[in-house]
Image (cartoon, coloured by chain):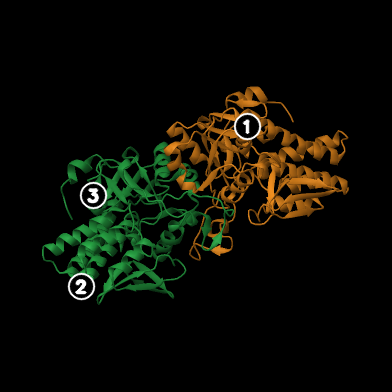
Chain colours: A orange, B green
Amino acid sequence: MRIMIDGHPRDMRAVWCDEGTVRMLDQRLLPHRVEVVGLVDHRQVAKAIRDMTVRGAPAIGVAAAYGMMLAANRGEDLQVAAKELKATRPTAFDLFFAVDHMLSEMEAGADPTDAAEAYADTIVKRCQLIGEHGERLIRDGARIMTHCNAGALATVDYGTALAPIREAWRKGKKLFVYVSETRPRLQGMKLTSFELMNEGIPHAVVPDGASGHFMREGVDLVIVGADRIAANGDFANKIGTYEKAVLANELGVPFYTAAPLSTFDLSIERGEDIPIEYRGEEEVTVVDGVRLAPYGCKALNPGFDVTPRRYLSGIITERGVLKPEEIIMGLRGERL
Amino acid sequence: MRIMIDGHPRDMRAVWCDEGTVRMLDQRLLPHRVEVVGLVDHRQVAKAIRDMTVRGAPAIGVAAAYGMMLAANRGEDLQVAAKELKATRPTAFDLFFAVDHMLSEMEAGADPTDAAEAYADTIVKRCQLIGEHGERLIRDGARIMTHCNAGALATVDYGTALAPIREAWRKGKKLFVYVSETRPRLQGMKLTSFELMNEGIPHAVVPDGASGHFMREGVDLVIVGADRIAANGDFANKIGTYEKAVLANELGVPFYTAAPLSTFDLSIERGEDIPIEYRGEEEVTVVDGVRLAPYGCKALNPGFDVTPRRYLSGIITERGVLKPEEIIMGLRGERL
């Protein structure tokens, strides 16, 4: 991804490995500060996943793969490390997928660093392919809505939902992107707009509750990411996704999710069975250190919601755009 | 409304007149500071409406009525004062209704202070009746969702959407209220939760985008206020209302708006003709003085959206619960 630093473009990933140290952008400080942290053991990686220094299902997966690499290179117990990494966040499937993938690669004798780097490269490559497949859904002059951040920051590079947008823009299509701000943590306003500004793609942030209003005024396409996709095509994504799916459906606006196959959990039949993370209420009542709600006021803060497959026009993957009903027959049993 | 100040309950209105001075709670400082401002001419009232010291359609109407009283008592040109007051905000109909009502009362020889006090008392009485009629829609143990603040702060006393909730609670019904926070200005989190806490009514604030998630988990009833209701039953209300209406409809959850007849604009046939106020983008990108979006990032900030009447289960008024299609036949030609 291209990031402008002091007026100069720099190409970087959201998570990478540099001479045995795992490095990542501290996403909690964006958009105002671009700061890179270095992590030397898997416990630091687990902490970075838990406190959302790194977030976004595919990027969490890559961070976890690097975490397993650090554990292996330090001679730690890999089963314990796997357990600690998996205990950080419950909803995004890539986390579990990446840890299990690293375990089986290393059992098969792979070098831990090579395996982690290959995992990261595979995810990046898949996002590139998602961009190429999804770009065909975008007409010149399209008005596209997205939610949360499913960009390069969430996936190491390119993005899932943002990959087709990036690709269409690079091909010279005119675009306008409605970015729903994504309360409570505002990943839309803070991260997606940061990525779009760095690329120069025209966009505006809108309050989450204004999404329906703008869809009604005229949105051609909604593209969001996914944290876990069940075998029947239901999927979990950032809270607020379900609402956009219902609204798009009501208004006849095509609604897509974009995700690599590492986000598909075929062991889960239906969306109702996906575990939903509840996060602390201060994420809602306190914004950037400022207490907004009355003291003593309760808040509820589900991190994700589940969108039934019937609202989905399709799933943009590295294999092409799948119909939700194609998942079970097409993918079951396949691995990375 | 009851407000706890230093642990002691105090009964007060959101706007009132005290020996020729118009007083109002500064709603921009709530919930953390309870501060009363005093206004001595209609220009100060116009400023207070414009800068949202006072907000909520019926409360804006009462403030404007007091503004007309101040202009009359100071011997100012009433047509000019009416124009200045009407130019403050475009969407809420009570503003225009109240100013025209005061003009015609004074033309008919009424004392300005008596007319303004009578207007305020009428609105309060109507909200009380809205509470009584709406309370019957609420079962013991109900989970109710509301949006923005359509409480005593928005209406001088009792509220519109909150009046039935207040009434049900006072009658001893068990309740739980989901308060959607209402970005960008967070009137749900800051004002509605303040009112509910002062009354001791159980509730939780939820991010706007989580409303659909909780409706799906189980909400019995959605009640919101209204800023302007067209003759066909379409209505404008705080941005985010339309989304909740669509979601409630999709999920089979009854969806009501509550408003006094002063909010009905029978000169407007359909919702599309209601003027929608766009407000500054800093309301979205800056929260309580903290810049959250990247510098240079654009935001769109419509203050209101329009909900088509087909999503409405009914309109709770001082006359009872009306079906949207009853409006034109039942109310046309009637006045306060």
Q: Which amino acid does label 1 sit on?
A: Lys
Where in the figure is residue B247, as x and y percent of width and height?
A: 43, 40
Q: Is residue B51 left or right of residue A193?
A: left
Q: Determine the secondary structure under disc 3.
A: strand
Label 1: chain letter: A
Evaluate if marks 1 and 2 touch, with contact meaning CB atoms under 8 Å apart.
no
Q: Where is the N terminus of chain B found, in terms of image quarters? A: bottom left
* Viewer-side residue, B172 vs B4: B4
Label 2: chain letter: B
Q: What residue type is labelled 3?
A: Gly
* Viewer-side residue, A251 vs B289: B289
Q: How many labels does the image show?
A: 3
Q: Which residue extends farthest bottom?
A: B19
Evaluate if marks 2 and 3 touch, with contact meaning CB atoms under 8 Å apart.
no
Label 2 neighbour load within 10 Å: few <14, some 14-19, many 20+: some
Q: Can residue B85 be seen in this view?
A: yes
Q: Mark 2 points at which residue?
A: B73
- Rendered image: mark on residue A171: 1
- Residue under disc 1 on the same chain as residue under disc 3: no
Q: Name the residue under label 3.
A: B320
* Viewer-side residue, B213 vs B57: B57
Label 3 neighbour load within 10 Å: few <14, some 14-19, many 20+: some
Q: Kindly report the distance in space between the C-alpha atoms of the residues bearing marks 1 and 2.
A: 67 Å
Where in the figure is residue B89, as x and y percent of width and height?
A: 34, 56
